[in-house]
Image (tube, rainbow, N blue to C red):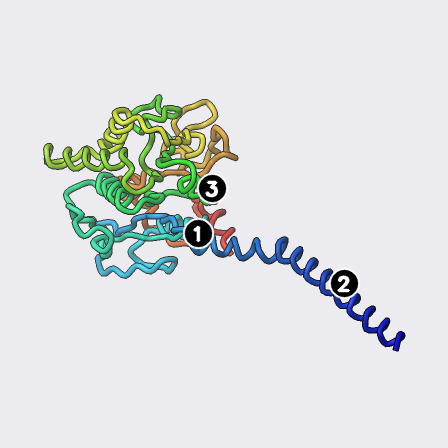
Amino acid sequence: MNNLFIFVFVFIIFIGIACYFYYDIFNMIYNEKVKPVIEKFNRTKNVKKNIVWTYIEDPIFYNNDYDIQLLVRSKNIPTLLKFCLRILQNKFNKTMNSLYVVTPFNVKKYLPDFPIEMNADSKYSIKFRVDLLAASLLEKYGGLFISPGTVVLQDLDEILYNLNNKYDLITFGGSIRNINSCNDALNPGNYVIAAKPNNPVIVDYRKKMLRNLYDQGYTDKLISEDLLSYSLQSIKPKSYFHFNCEYTGNVNNINHIVSLEEYFGYEPIRFKNKDNLIFIALPYDLILYDIDYKWVNNLSEEQFIEANTNITEIISKEVYKIK
């Protein structure tokens, strides 16, 4: 009887010790391995996705029998724009961010009251139209707007994270008209802009563009950069960050503006800081409609890759990286 009692007593103690170690080890594994995964999933599920915006349309000299499919060859879209779009799609985390490609056919879906026609037949320059579109989208939805023909060279996740958590407005590069603007946060370029919805600078910027449109009856294609500068200067935003020209390929190592001729030339470009390049914001309006660059728009993919100019090499290398 005593032996049975001792056996039962030892068995109970053994079960107690086993349960203690089991739950202790289980809790340790849960806290270290399982719980962080669940919390990360919940954070991801509850975070509102940022939107990366871009725009694309047929140049007026193409056949208007139009059927654009993202990342699929379309006879109406120049290879340069198509490649830039393909690169862009692979430069951010799809779980946290979404890419929206706006075209003349879906612009009313996002902006039902957009005041001008967005197509190549418009009487307004493509640069002004795209700038007004960008301001309108950012005011309503927020996100990161990237103009067509912009080559994205680095992941955009950090910029999008900073937009969510640190800044209400982020700008890049310098104003084309102001040659001394590369380090001037109040005179940025407007090919790439990131903003939260209803940002006061973007709201004022859009209003200034519309006022110019209605008061003047015509638009200088570079006026929108000036108007963005005026909005920044008058509002003086606090939650604002600016990336200077060494991040956008605007200047070389002696602070001279890199021209479109250099991009389509063969002499290597000595960027101010090649490792810092996030974007190369090309003047897409000149590429599409300047007679000197008509040849670029007629290149097939194979011809584009074999052209071996500075910019076609840069773009081709980025396309080659895509898996």
Residue kind at label 2, given as amino acid type: Ile
Q: Is residue 48 left or right of residue 136?
A: right
Which residue is painted at 37% across and 60% down in the image? 72
**Residue 168 spot, x, y in % from top left:** 36, 36
Q: Residues within 10 Å of mark 2 (few under 14, many from 20)?
A: few
Position above or below: 32 against 292 = below
Query: Which of 222 and 242 lies nearest the eye of the viewer?
Result: 242
Q: Which residue is the extreme one toward the bottom?
A: 1
* Residue 301 tag number: none
Task: Kindly identify the amino acid type of the residue bearing the numbered disc 1.
Answer: Met
Does 33 appear above or below 12?
above
Secondary structure beneath label 3: helix
How far apart marks 3 and 1 lie (CA) works out to 11 Å
Above/below status of 215 relative to 75: above
Residue type (three-letter) at the residue carrying disc 3: Glu
- The picture quadrant where one finds residue 152 is top left
Q: Determine whether 213 is above or below 56 in the image.
A: above
Task: Identify residue for label 2.
Answer: 17
| Disc 1, SS | loop
Q: N-terminal of the two: label 3 or label 1?
A: 1
Residue under pointer 1: 96
Q: Position of residue 229 (x, y in %)?
A: 28, 28
Is 123 positioned to the left or the right of 133 in the image? left
Question: Which sits earlier in the primary sequence, circle 3 or circle 2?
Answer: 2
In front of the other: 223 or 140: 140
Picture coordinates of residue 91, whole percent (x, y): 45, 48
Query: What quarter of the picture does the N terminus occupy?
Result: bottom right
